[in-house]
Image (cartoon, rainbow, N blue to C red):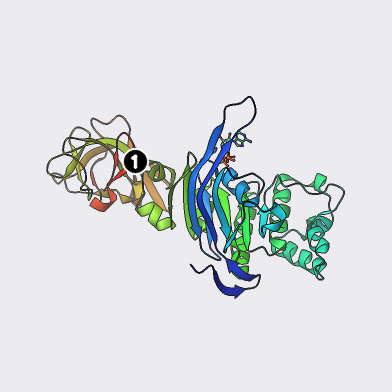
Amino acid sequence: MTTTTAPTASGTAKSLTIEALHKNYTSRGRESFHAVKGIDLDIRPGELVALLGPSGCGKTTTLRMIAGLETVTSGDIRIGDRSIPDLPPGKRDVGVGFESYALYPPLTVRQNLAYGLKARKVRDADARVQAIAERLEMTDLLDLRPAGLSSGQKQRVALARALIRNPPVLLLDEPLSHLDAAQRQRVRRELKVLQREFGYTTIVVTHDQLEALSLADRLAVMNNGVIQQFGTADEIFDDPANLFVADFVGEPKINLTEGVAESDGTVRVGRDGRLVSAARSVPAGGSVTVGIRPQDVQLAEAGSVSVPAEVVVFEDLLEFGLATVRVEGLDSHLVVQTPAGVVRRRGDRLHLSAPPERVYLFDADSGDRLR
Ligand SMILES: Nc1ncnc2c1ncn2[C@@H]1O[C@H](COP(=O)(O)OP(=O)(O)OP(=O)(O)O)[C@@H](O)[C@H]1O
């Protein structure tokens, strides 16, 4: 396997490979907790991967194992060809942007940023501090001490500290969560520019999908200590591996409803509705969970294979509209995205359909995708 690519400003970009990684937290007198359950990830040199998942799914634990802040229960982590679980954190070639990573209180931000560089006798340490501070819009913070910083300011300092060493691998845990909206957008863009420029192989942990989509080359969607799907945003959005991924990724949220597979290959939805799905591995008469994204719902002719519905509420969001509709025989409403300028009113009757490859079917018990 090749593990290096073209030289970048930071030297040579390195791959990051994770194999069968497990973490079992054990503490005396307490039940052990299996937080990470066999993760595999193959991250290309210079690639930015977002680790996306709900609170408690094991994202931070995974990052801490790569950084060496947490021991590995089993499995391997390699940077390039080098296996790192037995190396101390300082020898791993990893830049860590964790908020909790303490700054030295008596030193100013400038001194904190320069500290590691000076310890390694880097000659242009002061110039590098100045340069990174300018890129992250934080020159005004350089002469302050950590105790005087807001949480958003601390976050930018943590990011600067991770970047300043030009590490081949960069690990960022919720790097923008405390910034206000405008700042978040600017720092996000700058982070991406720097990451591209210097070729850091990067993992960003986030539970914010917009952040993940805008930053990442590929997303790893995680739940319950397991990677549920690893792919580009389009792959994950267009071809979700299971019910969890379909439900977790996408805004507005996917419609999920119960359905019954018919012998003619259609799926019954509600009392009178039917849809065509491209899924073939569904036994006739079987109960399934049907998933359709609001963006994929189309209007159909009355009498065609479709789902009759009635508008309950319409929201005009300028760039598009959202119609919430009631379907006879379904417990919950469906949401339909409509093009800009199309106005629906309460009581409007519609016939809904969707392209067959966009009508996702999931096993009603396991949530596995039926194809
Ligand atoms: N030191 C520990 N001992 C025991 N259990 C732990 C320990 N640290 C974390 N856990 C548990 O492991 C699970 C995963 O935690 P982790 O912090 O990795 O999740 P996360 O996905 O990063 O969540 P969040 O977004 O809330 O930080 C959680 O259930 C957490 O309670």
Q: Nearer the viewer, residue 144 or 173?
A: 173
Residue type marked 1: Asn
In the image, is residue 107 above or below residue 53?
Answer: below
Name the residue at the top extreme.
Answer: 29
Image position, residue 286 (x, y; %): 20, 35
Q: Secondary structure at mark 1?
A: strand
Q: Is residue 45 visible?
A: yes
Q: In the drawing, does residue 343 fall left or right of residue 199?
A: left
In the image, is residue 4 above or below residue 247?
Answer: below
Reading the image, the residue beneath label 1 is 255
Few, some or many C-alpha atoms within 10 Å of disc 1 (few <14, some 14-19, many ≥20)? some
Q: Nearer the viewer, residue 107 or 46?
A: 46
Name the residue at the right extreme.
Answer: 106
Q: In the drawing, does residue 23 fall left or right of residue 141?
A: left
Image position, residue 70 (x, y; %): 64, 44
| Displayed-image quarter of ligand 1 | top right
Q: Nearer the viewer, residue 141 or 124?
A: 124
In the image, is residue 28 above or below residue 115?
Answer: above
- Assess mark 1: CB under 8 A from ligand 1? no
> What residue appears at the point 78 percent right and 60 percent down from the top-left corner?
139
Q: In the drawing, does residue 63 fall left or right of residue 278?
A: right
Image position, residue 73 (x, y; %): 57, 42
Image position, residue 179 (x, y; %): 65, 49
Q: Is residue 324 visible?
A: no
Q: Nearer the viewer, residue 335 or 237?
A: 237
> What residue appears at the point 69 percent right and 61 percent down from the top-left corner?
163
In the image, is residue 114 above or below residue 365?
Answer: below
> What residue appears at the point 66 percent right and 70 percent down from the top-left corner?
10
